[in-house]
Image (cartoon, coloured by chain):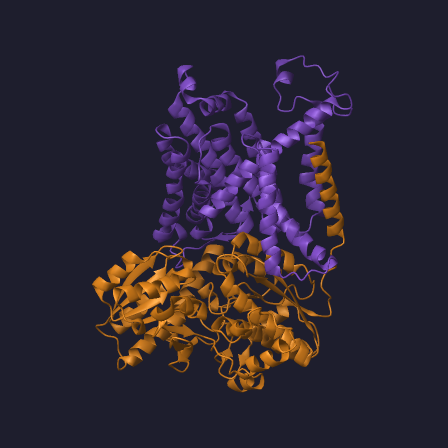
């Protein structure tokens, strides 16, 4: 009833090609952004910013990066964490070695470094596909961590290879409190999500999807395979690189190469799968699911156990968490293999017909 | 589809209701201690013993003395699974549980998590304990006011090991060859600067051999050791890497009594699975194992006869890691006591006050005897210049069933090692653009 597009007429090309064609969506999005930018910073607690919202946004950005590559361009990759590591260490080095470089510029350059590395490891994609390509990108995972550990220059000759991020400054505003960090991350993520959405629905995105669906046919209709695939790798790694820089600067404050392990790459891949392959919204939903559910269960299980008089220790809570988590992943994949984003889409379609479905 | 959606809706509503019924924050009249622990995950077995000892000591003190000068201790654990991101989440969650103590003194027993917390802990004024590990240049309290690598750092420890070996060889290692076999991570790389300094000073040769994480594949490394045939192997391993090394040494026929490990590589969790191969292996330790220490005997009596003990496997009480946990809790409690002596006995201490306590710790042998911990850990005397406070380790040897001490407390070469910390800390201060200053 509320969610109906009857009476909304598109009378110009501009109106026809906007991101949210339905007015309710536009209002909803504006409200969401207002809440995220104004209400949350005013009401949230430090715990929410530092432990929940910032990592959620950072991982959503990394998942978006992988989604560009895997979801839109169909190239399987297991190297997301490595590209994040490149971004984190590059941003650190730009800040350290170039006097007075603006923070945002160093993040953009860090993203470019990650993109360059991504293109390098994307080269095999011209010859191999699917699982074989996953193995090739796996090499990035090990190589990058090895380089960062091996050459002390990257960590400014720190004896342990661990970097500690310098103070952050955004054109004169010191980013030192959790709220400021949150707003800063939110700003970057919003801009990049907007760019990604537009890229996905432009000719670039269509070329990616053509390559994903059938690369031979795509080549026949004149899409340059090499350029398209490498562009996907570059854009994807750029996103992962910026996410890595944010992860190091705004979330942990200090990172070591080992922190960017294969495990992290898998987590990002799961976010994409659970959230929805080939969907920008899915990246956010997947990140929320993978990050927030364990924390949520952590909060809920002990009181629940106390209520039922069960002798729970911390360790058993942790084990049960893993079981519920695994169970839910299986459940979702069976009920909705296209991820949470697809569930949302179905809900929207139903709402548009409600209350008179046909 | 419809029923599943309804089910999910119902589940979500129930969960939201439950969350709103969560218990309120910890009581402000108690000294709340945050414990980001790990009892599952890759190093879960180590964590079970360590945090078992930690919690047991706190519980023991509550039962025995009603806390510290009448202030009851309370605590909450949060499972980190040895994962940095989870560790940060735990820290953020726990520090808000009590708005006076903010978690008292946080001890994560994980280098990665500690690194991530160093800056945050200064902002939040929560002391960060890194007993026997951690960011070693934090020994310089003028740059790292809230970080405390108490008892021994990796550098001082390796220096003490070199001293032990030199003593064994009539005071000098000149002309000898030592292989340094290490976990190729922050943990294994930190002592390199110290062993290189020692080698230059003592005129012996060091062969550095890294092992990739997790270390269950060491064939090439031991082949190299066989070729080089060093006089000793100093071993910086952890987790599964330790038993693998001992077995590999047995396979290539390298004498185990010429291998000497760090304290992370010196617990029952490492030697028992290696079985026969571990016999004769030595390691450094800063807390003595066994149940003969009075406080451990008393914990067994007070907690384990009444079923209040934290360890599910009672046999592990008195193991290296368990006693280490007790030592860590003991140091925390002594810091609270020291702080109370200055800021008022019987009061709940804030993070800032506990920080002062940690910086002015003076645990003498007499004090250790009073609390029943004679010989459990070395004397600790800290100051702003020296957050380590000791730098001493003992060397122990595995006799096939238990650890036997083969040395008294050995102090590393402070004159050689501490300037290294100072230089590293100064570099850090410059990177961060801060002026080193001691907090009052």
Q: Is B52 in front, or is B369?
A: B52
Give the position of the C terminus of chain A as an image quadrant: top right
Residue lying farthest to the top in this orientation: A11
Q: Give how far across and how far down residue A79 sits, in percent.
A: 43, 40
Q: Does residue A335 lie above or below B41 as drawn?
A: above
Give the position of the N terminus of chain A as an image quadrant: top right
Locate residue B290 relative to residue A1 in the image: left or right. left
Q: Is B373 in front, or is B322?
A: B322
**How many callouts does the rendering have?**
0
Q: In which quarter of the image is residue B184?
A: bottom left
Chain identifier of the orange chain:
B
Can I make out residue B261 in this image? no
Q: Give how far across and how far down residue A214 sits, in percent.
A: 44, 22
Q: Is B327 in front, or is B116?
A: B327
Can I make out residue B81 in this image? yes
Q: Which residue appears at 60% of the width and 37% of the height? A: A332
Q: Is B317 in front, or is A106?
A: B317
Q: Does residue B76 lie above or below A349 as drawn?
A: below
Q: Give how far across and how far down residue A94 sits, in percent.
A: 43, 45
Q: In which quarter of the image is residue B283?
A: bottom left
What colour is chain A? purple
Q: Does residue A148 lie above or below B378 as drawn?
A: above
Q: Which residue appears at 41% of the width and 48% of the height? A: A97
Q: Give how far across and how far down residue B42 sits, in percent.
A: 48, 57
Q: Does residue A5 lie above or below A195 as drawn?
A: above
């Amino acid at each position: 009833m509320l969610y109906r597009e009857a009476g909304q007429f598109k009378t110009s090309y501009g109106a026809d090609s906007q991101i949210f064609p339905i007015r309710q969506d536009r209002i909803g999005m504006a409200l969401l952004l207002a809440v995220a930018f104004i209400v949350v910073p005013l009401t949230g607690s430090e715990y929410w910013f530092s432990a929940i919202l910032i990592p959620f946004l950072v991982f959503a950005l990394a998942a978006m990066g992988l989604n560009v590559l895997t979801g839109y361009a169909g190239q399987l990759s297991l190297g997301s964490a490595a590209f994040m590591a490149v971004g984190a260490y590059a941003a650190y080095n730009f800040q350290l070695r170039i006097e007075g470089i603006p923070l945002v510029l160093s993040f953009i350059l860090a993203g470019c470094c990650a993109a360059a590395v991504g293109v390098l490891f994307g080269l095999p994609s011209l010859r191999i596909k699917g699982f074989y390509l996953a193995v090739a990108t796996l090499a990035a995972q090990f190589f990058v961590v090895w380089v960062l550990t091996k050459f002390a220059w990257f960590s400014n000759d720190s004896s342990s290879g661990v970097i500690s991020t310098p103070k952050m400054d955004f054109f004169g505003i010191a980013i030192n409190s959790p709220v400021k960090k949150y707003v800063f991350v939110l700003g970057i993520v919003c801009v990049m999500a907007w760019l990604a959405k537009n890229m996905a629905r432009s000719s670039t995105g269509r070329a990616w999807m053509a390559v994903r669906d059938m690369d031979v046919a795509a080549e026949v209709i004149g899409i340059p395979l090499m350029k398209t695939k490498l562009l996907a790798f570059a854009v994807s790694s750029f996103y992962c690189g910026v996410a890595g820089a944010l992860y190091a600067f705004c979330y942990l404050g200090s990172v070591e190469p080992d922190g960017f392990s294969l495990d992290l790459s898998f987590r990002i891949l799961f976010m994409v799968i659970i959230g929805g392959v080939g969907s920008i919204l899915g990246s956010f939903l997947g990140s929320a699911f993978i990050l927030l559910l364990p924390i949520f269960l952590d909060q809920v299980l002990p009181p629940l156990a106390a209520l039922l008089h069960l002798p729970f220790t911390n360790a058993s809570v942790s084990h049960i968490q893993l079981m519920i988590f695994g169970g839910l992943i299986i459940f979702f994949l069976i009920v909705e293999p296209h991820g949470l984003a697809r569930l949302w889409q179905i809900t929207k379609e139903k709402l548009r017909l409600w209350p008179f479905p046909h | 589809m419809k029923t599943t959606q309804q089910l999910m809706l119902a589940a979500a509503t129930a969960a939201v209701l439950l969350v709103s019924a969560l218990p309120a924050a910890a009581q402000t009249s108690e000294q709340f201690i945050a414990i980001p622990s790990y009892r599952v995950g890759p190093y879960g077995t180590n964590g079970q013993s360590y945090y078992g000892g930690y919690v047991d000591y706190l519980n023991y003190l509550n039962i025995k003395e009603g806390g510290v000068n009448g202030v009851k201790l309370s605590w909450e654990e949060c499972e980190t699974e040895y994962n940095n991101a989870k560790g940060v989440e735990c820290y953020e969650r726990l520090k808000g549980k009590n708005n006076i103590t903010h978690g008292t003194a946080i001890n994560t027993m994980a280098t990665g998590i500690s690194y991530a917390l160093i800056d945050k802990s200064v902002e939040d004024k929560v002391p960060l304990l890194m007993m026997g590990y951690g960011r070693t240049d934090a020994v310089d309290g003028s740059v790292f006011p809230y970080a405390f690598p108490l008892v021994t750092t990796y550098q001082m420890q390796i220096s003490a090991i070199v001293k032990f070996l030199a003593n064994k060889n009539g005071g000098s290692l000149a002309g000898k060859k030592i292989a340094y076999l290490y976990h190729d991570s922050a943990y294994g790389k930190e002592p390199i600067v110290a062993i290189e300094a020692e080698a230059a000073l003592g005129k012996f040769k060091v062969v550095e051999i890294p092992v990739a994480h997790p270390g269950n594949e060491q064939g090439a490394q031991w082949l190299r050791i066989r070729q080089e045939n060093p006089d000793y192997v100093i071993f910086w391993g952890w987790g599964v890497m330790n038993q693998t090394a001992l077995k590999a040494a047995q396979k290539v026929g390298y004498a185990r009594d010429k291998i000497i490990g760090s304290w992370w590589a010196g617990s029952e969790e490492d030697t028992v699975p290696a079985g026969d191969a571990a016999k004769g292996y030595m390691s450094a330790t800063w807390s003595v194992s066994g149940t003969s220490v009075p406080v451990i005997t008393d914990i067994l009596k007070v907690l384990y006869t009444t079923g209040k003990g934290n360890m599910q496997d009672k046999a592990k009480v008195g193991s290296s890691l368990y006693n280490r946990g007790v030592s860590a809790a003991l140091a925390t409690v002594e810091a609270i006591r020291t702080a109370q002596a200055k800021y008022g006995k019987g009061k709940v201490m804030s993070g800032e006050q506990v920080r002062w306590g940690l910086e002015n710790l003076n645990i003498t042998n007499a004090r250790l005897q009073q609390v029943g911990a004679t010989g459990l850990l070395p004397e600790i005397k800290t100051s702003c210049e020296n957050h380590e406070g000791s730098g001493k380790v003992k060397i122990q040897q595995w006799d096939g069933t238990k650890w036997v001490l083969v040395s008294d407390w050995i102090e590393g070469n402070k004159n050689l090692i501490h300037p290294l910390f100072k230089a590293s800390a100064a570099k850090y201060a410059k990177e961060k653009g801060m002026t080193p200053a001691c907090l009052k």
